[in-house]
Amino acid sequence: MFKEKTIVYTSGTFDMFHCNHLKMINYARSLGDVLIVGVSSDELVSSYKAPPAIPFTERMQIIEALRTPDIVIPQHSLDHKEIVKKLNIDAFVVGDDWFGKYDYLKDLGVQVFYFPYGTGVSTSNLKKTIHDTYESNLQLQQQAKPSNLGETSEESSDKA
């Protein structure tokens, strides 16, 4: 502890920021005195899944705009040993979709918490919903088009 303060670190991609992201950050805040939030760079995210829809600088600005974090930093690695040592982190919070992945931090004296997202909103679900809605709207638009769009006005008047 630094001057009797507990330092908590949480991190994520925070793409298409939603309520489960906020719940995890607020949970992390409740565990200590100082909250540091790491935002994964586009390069880091692209190394293990599809690139984020929202650019890194904008994701940083969104997290910085929250009242909860004391410090927001870029995250360039999934190996948190260095950041834990440099920032004297006491507790680490990450979504339970990473369960077990960060247990190695316990050897460094860090308490690791896997935040249960549960069901509901996720970035993957949001992307799928947006995609499916867009596809559905396209189909509806195509069905609603008049069948004589390719005809000239002369051809249309001949049919009348």
Image (spheres, helix red, strand yellow):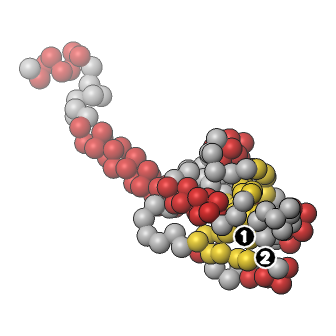
Identify the mark nearer the N-term, 1 or 2. 1
Q: Using residue 1 as the reference point, say whether residue 51 is left or right of it.
A: left
Pick the residue in front: 130 or 157.
130
In which quarter of the view is residue 57 placed? top right
Q: Do the residues labelled 1 and 2 touch (CB within 8 Å)?
A: yes
Viewport quadrant of the C terminus:
top left
Pick the residue in front: 29 or 86.
29
Q: Using residue 147 as the reference point, say whether residue 132 is left or right of it.
A: right
Above or below: residue 72 compared with residue 125: above
In which quarter of the view is residue 142 placed? top left
Disc 2 element? loop
Query: Residue visible at 76% across and 50% down?
Result: 71
Circle 2 residue:
110
Disc 1 element? strand
Q: How far apart are marks 1 and 2 (CA)?
A: 7 Å
Query: Residue visible at 74% across and 57% down?
Result: 34
Residue 81 in the image: state x and y as whole percent: 86, 72
Residue 69 in the image: state x and y as whole percent: 68, 51
Viewport quadrant of the N terminus:
bottom right
Query: Residue visible at 73% across and 64% down?
Result: 8
Q: Using residue 99 as the reference point, say whether residue 124 is left or right of it.
A: left
> Mark 1 belongs to which amino acid?
Phe
Assess disc 2: are there few (<14), some (14-19) or many (≥20) residues with their C-alpha within 10 Å of its C-alpha: many
Pick the residue in front: 78 or 136.
78
Residue 33 got which mark? none
**Residue 55 visible, this orientation:** no
Q: Using residue 151 as the reference point, say whether residue 13 is left or right of it.
A: right
Circle 1 residue:
92
Query: Residue visible at 26% across and 25% down?
Result: 151
> Mark 2 belongs to which amino acid?
Val
Assess disc 1: are there few (<14), some (14-19) or many (≥20) residues with their C-alpha within 10 Å of its C-alpha: many
